[in-house]
Amino acid sequence: MQKSALIGTIVAALFLGSANAVAGPWEDGMVAYNRGDYVPAIRLFRPLAEAGNPKAQTQIGTMYRRGEGVTFSPTRAFMWFSVAAKRGDAKAKAGLRDVSRKMTPAEMSQARQMALACEASNYRYCEY
């Protein structure tokens, strides 16, 4: 009897302890994004992207491509996808292909210049 009570207490402690787990900015950003709260999501993703996180860079590219929480901009989407693709992100590579199909050569050239400036500034000057 005491043994089963001890096991029950341990199991309850494990479940209650996991409820107190703290999510990071990426997880919090995805929760906000999936809820449709795009402005808080991009505020959480932007510092991660500027720190060189390719998942956050890809997510920002997706948001620019769709106009979610930001002004619709294929050029900015291309820029963010470009920097993430250089870091090996497969979703960014796919996003880059998709968005480039709808862009003019001039827009792609501008986006490439923006990506170069973004990277050269160590992600400090990535907003235009």
Image: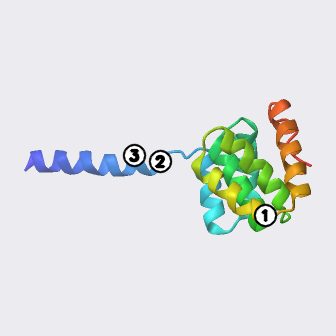
Which residue is found at the position 67% from the left and 51% from the top? Answer: 58
Give the residue type at disc 1: Gly
Q: Residue furthest front?
A: 105
Q: Considering the numbered disc 2 on the image, is that residue within a helix, a strand or a loop? A: loop
Q: Considering the numbered disc 1 on the image, is that residue within a helix, a strand or a loop? A: loop
- Horizontal side, residue 22 vs residue 93: left or right: left
Q: Residue furthest left?
A: 1
Instruction: First in sequence, mark 2 or 1: give its number.
Output: 2
Which residue is found at the position 21% from the left and 51% from the top? Answer: 8
> Which of the 4 quarters of the picture holds residue 84?
top right
Residue 41 visible (yes or no): no
Give the residue type at disc 2: Asn
- Which x, y percent locates residue 45? 70, 48
* Circles 2 and 3: CB atoms closer than 8 Å: yes
Mark toward the viewer: 3 or 1: 1
* Circles 3 and 1: CB atoms closer than 8 Å: no
- Residue that label 3 marks: 17
- Horizontal side, residue 90 vs residue 73: left or right: left
- Horizontal side, residue 60 vs residue 27: left or right: right
- Which x, y percent locates residue 80? 76, 49
* Circles 2 and 1: CB atoms closer than 8 Å: no
Give the residue type at disc 3: Gly
- Residue that label 1 marks: 69
- Which x, y percent locates residue 79? 80, 49
Image mark count: 3
Which residue is found at the position 63% from the left and 56% from the top? Answer: 94
Q: Residues within 10 Å of mark 1 (few under 14, many from 20)?
A: some
- Residue that label 2 marks: 20
Distance between mark 3 and mark 1 Cα atoms = 34 Å
Residue 73 visible (yes or no): yes
